[in-house]
Image (cartoon, rainbow, N blue to C red):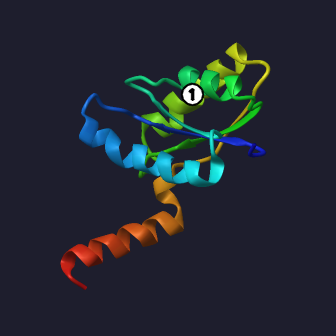
Amino acid sequence: MAERALILVAHGSPDPDWRRPLERLVERLAESLGDAVAIAYLAHPPSLDDAITTLEQAGHRRALVVAALLSPGGRHVKHDIPAAVEAARARYPGVEIELAPGALGDDDQVIAALARASLERLGR
């Protein structure tokens, strides 16, 4: 069992094409983390509560929430996700829930990967 479970939080969409890259990311992470990774959406199920419940039922008592968004700016990263995490802390006192600062897309490694993918599409 991983020391801390990982919860990726994104806006969400009912469109399966929108969700597919995040689902692929979770599948890849599960290769290393097993059942210590979950996805949550702000606008569609599964919610943050759903993700925490799933992890808690699997025995995880510590979780890191990461905004799976490209930009650290905007309402979701600055308000919605922190508010959801704060509310979840009150509802799940047996789970230590930490919020990573910013957004995943602002990480230098993510930017480098996006640059490589963009150049590949350009044929360079």
Whether residue 70 is visible, yes or no, is yes
Horizontally, residue 14 falls left or right of residue 64, namely: left
Q: What residue do we see at 48% from left, 48% from top?
A: 27
Kind of residue at badge 1: Ala
Q: Which residue is mark 1?
A: 51
Give the quarter of the image for residue 41: top left
Horizontally, residue 123 falls left or right of residue 69, namely: left
Q: Nearer the viewer, residue 96 or 22?
A: 22
> Does 8 sit above or below residue 87?
below
Mark 1 surroundings: few (<14), some (14-19) or many (≥20) residues within 10 A: many
> Does 112 sit above or below residue 47?
below
> Does 61 sit above or below residue 93?
below
Quadrant showing the N terminus:
top right
The residue sitting at the top extreme is 91
Q: What residue do we see at 41% from left, 49% from top?
A: 24
Q: What residue do we see at 50% from left, 28% from top?
A: 80
Residue 84 x, y percent position in the rendering: 56, 24
Whether residue 72 is visible, yes or no, is no
Q: Nearer the viewer, residue 36 or 13?
A: 36
